Image: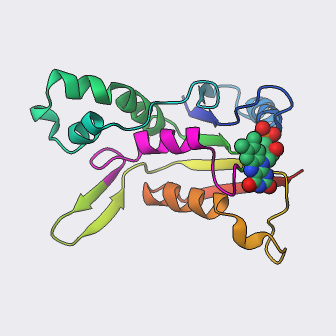
Amino acid sequence: MKKLLEIQSSVRQENSISRTLSNQFVQTWKTAHPDIQHIIRDVGIDPPAHPTELWTKANYTAPEARTPEMIAALAHSEQLIAELLGADYLLLGVPMYNFSIPSNLKAYLDNVVRVGRTFAFDKETLTFEGLATGKKALAILPSASDYSPGTPMAQMDFCKPYLRAVLGFVCIEEVTVVSVPN
Ligand SMILES: Cc1cc2nc3c(=O)[nH]c(=O)nc-3n(C[C@H](O)[C@H](O)[C@H](O)COP(=O)(O)O)c2cc1C
């Protein structure tokens, strides 16, 4: 069964454009894919913790050498990564906050973009390889202003390029972005 992972990051429940459009997309998508398993990860309501010193130490310690405290520090991150790696499709609701993505979504990304888990680093060649292969993503990006190419505000959009870059880094390269100036 294919899995659709919906990641919402608006802090608003009411009148949220990213949530409303995502819901509409999911309803339509489900009529075409009735067997899809739909999982919601709502970092707008329930943000993951930011990485800490212990978390970082644990991340750079080989799994077999991690202490119980290190394992505990990475537990939620491991859960988020398993969820992400298990998904075939991603739907992201990403409102622009101060020209970038919401900080709760950044905390989510800090938890899932991890060496040895979603990307590999080759010490010999100093090259990276994304490990979150075989996924397609749709991102719905509402903003108060218009950042379309050629508009005066276009250069202030750090949301779209960042999202594409960070998803591409872990090998999620088929990303459709729908900007929604409102
Ligand atoms: C903290 C915060 C920062 C925002 N910063 C920007 C911004 O830099 N540029 C912009 O065009 N809109 C900005 N907005 C407006 C939101 O992007 C816009 O209201 C969007 O529709 C919010 O998504 P939502 O409707 O799904 O909650 C900001 C809103 C909030 C709450």
Give the image quarter of residue 41: top right
**Picture quadrant where residue 45 is located:** top right
In the rendered view, does 17 fall on the left or right side of 169? right
Please provide percent x and percent y for residue 73. 29, 27
Looking at the rendering, the stretch of residues picked out in magenta corresponds to 97-119
Which residue appears at 84% of the width and 74% of the height? 151
Q: Nearer the viewer, residue 88 or 164?
A: 164
Rendered image coloring scheme: rainbow
The residue drawn where x is 17% and y is 21% is 68
**141 left or right, relative to 159:** right
| In front of the other: 165 or 1 | 165
**67 over 150 or under it: above or below:** above
Q: For the N terminus, give its image quadrant.
A: top right
Viewer-closest of 36 and 102: 102
Q: Is residue 81 above or below residue 132?
A: above
Q: Residue furthest left?
A: 65
Left or right position of 140 against 81: right
Q: Is residue 132 visible?
A: yes
